[in-house]
Image (cartoon, helix red, strand yellow):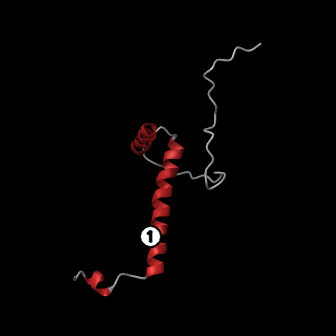
Amino acid sequence: MTDFNDDTALSRSGKTSPDGKLTARLDVPVSDVLNEALIGLAVIQGVSKAEFARGILERVIFGELNMMRRIARTGPSSPSEESGTR
């Protein structure tokens, strides 16, 4: 009979991404300094390096995409705003 302790550690987080399965991969070469900084910030947040990097990419890309969509809906700024006059 196997002796199990009460501190069972599961290999998965138990969280499901709202975007579905995360099967696509990015292989991005980075410097050692950037990699260490990424790991450090992930540790502070209590998430894996991949999860932290994915969150940054989502905020930057989807934030930019959202702004582009808003500009496309409303059009460019009025001429007075573009020239800097008020």
Q: Which of these two is toward me, 80 or 25? A: 80
Name the quarter where the C terminus is drawn.
bottom left
Q: Can you tell which quarter of the image residue 38 is in?
A: top left
Q: Is residue 81 left or right of residue 16?
A: left
Q: Residue at x 62, y 28 (%)?
A: 9
For residue 79, above or below residue 56: below
Outermost residue, front side: 6
For residue 34, above or below residue 74: above
- x then y, percent, for residue 10: 64, 31
Q: Is residue 26 left or right of residue 64?
A: right
Q: Residues within 10 Å of mark 1 (few under 14, many from 20)?
A: few
Q: Which of these two is toward me, 34 or 5? A: 5
Name the quarter where the N terminus is drawn.
top right
Name the residue that disc number 1 marks.
67
Q: Can you tell which quarter of the image residue 36 is in?
A: top left
Q: Which of these two is toward me, 26 or 6? A: 6
- x then y, percent, for residue 20: 65, 54
Q: Which of these two is toward me, 38 or 78? A: 78
Q: Residue at x 63, y 51 (%)?
A: 22
Disc 1, SS: helix
Could you tell me the amino acid type at mark 1?
A: Met
Q: Residue at x 47, y 37 (%)?
A: 46
Outermost residue, right side: 1
Outermost residue, bottom side: 79
- x then y, percent, for residue 5: 64, 17
Q: Can you tell which quarter of the image residue 8 is in?
A: top right
For residue 2, above or below residue 83: above
Q: Residue at x 41, y 45 (%)?
A: 34
